[in-house]
Image: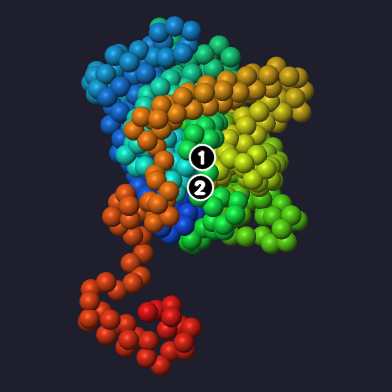
């Protein structure tokens, strides 16, 4: 029998997670320079369009088809085009129609690909990005989703991290965030630094967009984490509360770190701290108490605030701090389970600080670093091949002009009149009676 209440919750959660990709587009779009805002947002929307199609054609089958051996990849032909899933009213999730589970997992695949784009802002060809997104999802994300999210049930055999290693990753600290963060680092190394990196100021052009995007991400993330319970139950409620408090603590931790280090607590820091906390609690929200979630969030906020500066020390240009927030935050959250998990939480496992020893800790570490290594190596290889064949990075002249105009023939902000004499006369009228400095701005 289909549980209509659980089905409604899962479909609502899927819609919330889908909203996260436009939210990410706003978050990333506000952080780049004005000449790149449309391209940055298009990379998220492009991923949304492409991965949706690939997920239906074969992505779901690779991730959740019967394992082909060693827990590494599902059968890509089993659910090709989602065959057989519309008629079946039973589900591995229990009480859910299979298509509800298909929908929920689809939006995870979409945002994972979109997250990578922040590492290569201002300098990537959109066409090559779309080719990369399709290849990367096929070769990297779909198999890793099988490792982490596909649990063995009855006659179905799933992935090795979920079933053999038995690492806890409730909603995607490894498959989503460590995966995307490692891929972002690899692509940043392949494409190289932006022109003027480390010499010119590359400040966010629109901080209200950044904060709006962060707010939408926080809102949608309740579907991401609480929705991963796949039911409207106590597990979902615990995940919801833990997501709330860990994120709040991370924002406070980031702001406190900024204040001590720089003397200012910034809006960009608040938004970034929110995302860092969301990333960290994602794998851990079923295994921690609310107090443990506060501790994890505060640690993640502070460490990620420090980690974003590593790119200047080591000389890689991770444009929008995908490495500092998603890779580091994902590692903190995934490995943190091994320290802060409590058997009182729904996952029912004690970590090191609750008397559980290092058993869960080593499992968490192996899962985290296995995904990191595979994602980095595979992404570097894919990016390098694309760079040397079709070309991945835009020309220097185009980078100076701005990727929006060169690639999309558009500008995010049409602030200058271009329609001839009448517009010029209008501009003169607007300037009448204004101080000289204001006239200069509006002309």
Quadrant in which the N terminus appears: top left
Q: In terms of depth relative to the viewer, which is nearer, 138 or 188?
A: 188
- Tell me the crowding category of disc 2: few under 14, some 14 to 19, or many 20 or more residues within 10 angstroms, Cα based: many
Task: Determine whether label 1 and label 2 are within 8 Å by CB.
Answer: no
Can you give x and y, in whole percent of width and height, for residue 308 in the image? 63, 45
Q: What residue sits 49% from the left and 28% below the top?
A: 380
Left or right, residue 29 beside residue 281: left
Above or below residue 5? Residue 367 is above
Q: In terms of depth relative to the viewer, which is nearer, 335 or 410?
A: 410
Give the numbered dot on residue 409.
none
Q: In terms of depth relative to the viewer, which is nearer, 435 or 216?
A: 435
Above or below residue 276? Residue 372 is above
Q: Is residue 43 visible?
A: yes
Above or below residue 340? Residue 290 is below
Residue that lies at the very extreme toward the front in this rendered image = 397
Can you give x and y, in whole percent of width and height, for residue 14 in the image? 38, 38
Q: Is residue 11 visible?
A: no
Can you give x and y, in whole percent of width and height, for residue 281 in the image? 59, 37
Q: Which residue position holds label 1?
A: 192
- Tell me the crowding category of disc 1: few under 14, some 14 to 19, or many 20 or more residues within 10 angstroms, Cα based: some
Secondary structure at badge 1 equals loop
Can you give x and y, in whole percent of width and height, for residue 390 in the image? 34, 33
Residue that lies at the very extreme toward the bottom in this rendered image = 433
Q: What residue sits 33% from the left and 60% below the top?
A: 411
Left or right, residue 183 beside residue 67: right
Left or right, residue 181 beside residue 300: left
- C-alpha distance separating marks 1 and 2: 7 Å
Q: What residue sits 33% from the left and 67% below the top?
A: 414
Q: Quadrant of residue 266?
A: bottom right
Secondary structure at badge 2 equals loop
Q: Which residue position holds label 2?
A: 194
């Amino acid at each position: 029998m289909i549980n209509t209440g659980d089905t409604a919750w899962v479909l609502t959660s899927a819609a919330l997670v889908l909203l996260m990709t436009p939210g990410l587009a706003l978050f990333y779009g506000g952080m780049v320079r004005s000449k790149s805002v449309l391209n940055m947002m298009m990379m998220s929307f492009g991923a949304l369009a492409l991965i949706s199609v690939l997920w239906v054609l074969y992505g779901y089958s690779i991730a959740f088809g019967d394992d082909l051996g060693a827990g590494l990849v599902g059968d890509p032909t089993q659910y090709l085009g989602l065959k057989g899933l519309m008629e079946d009213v039973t589900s591995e999730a229990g009480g859910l129609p299979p298509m509800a589970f298909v929908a929920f997992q689809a939006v995870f695949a979409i945002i994972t690909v979109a997250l990578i784009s922040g590492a290569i802002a201002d300098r990537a060809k959109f066409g090559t990005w779309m080719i990369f997104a399709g290849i990367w999802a096929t070769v990297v994300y779909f198999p890793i989703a099988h490792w982490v999210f596909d649990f063995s049930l009855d006659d179905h055999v799933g992935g090795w991290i979920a079933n053999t290693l038995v690492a806890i990753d409730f909603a995607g600290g490894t498959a989503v965030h460590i995966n995307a963060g490692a891929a972002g680092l690899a692509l940043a190394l392949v494409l190289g630094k932006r022109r003027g990196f480390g010499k010119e100021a590359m400040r966010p052009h629109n901080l209200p967009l950044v904060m709006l995007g962060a707010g939408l991400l926080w809102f949608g993330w309740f579907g991401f984490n609480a929705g991963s319970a796949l039911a409207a139950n106590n597990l979902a409620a615990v995940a919801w509360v833990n997501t709330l408090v860990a994120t709040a603590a991370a924002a406070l931790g980031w702001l406190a770190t900024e204040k001590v280090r720089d003397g200012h607590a910034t809006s960009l820091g608040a938004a970034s701290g929110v995302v860092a906390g969301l990333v960290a609690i994602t794998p851990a929200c079923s295994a921690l108490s609310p107090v443990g979630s506060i501790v994890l969030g505060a640690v993640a906020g502070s460490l990620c605030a420090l980690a974003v500066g590593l790119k200047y020390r080591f000389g890689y240009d991770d444009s929008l701090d995908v490495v500092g927030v998603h890779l580091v935050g994902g590692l903190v959250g995934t490995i943190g389970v091994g320290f802060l998990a409590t058997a009182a939480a729904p996952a029912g496992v004690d970590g090191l600080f609750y008397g559980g020893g290092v058993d869960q800790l080593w499992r968490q570490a192996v899962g985290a670093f296995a995904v990191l290594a595979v994602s980095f190596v595979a992404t570097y290889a894919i990016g390098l091949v694309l760079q040397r064949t079709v070309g991945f990075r835009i020309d220097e002249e185009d980078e100076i002009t701005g990727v929006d105009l060169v690639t999309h023939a558009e500008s995010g902000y049409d602030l200058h009149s271009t329609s001839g004499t009448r517009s010029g006369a209008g501009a003169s009228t607007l300037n009448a009676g204004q101080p000289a400095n204001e006239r200069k701005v509006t002309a």
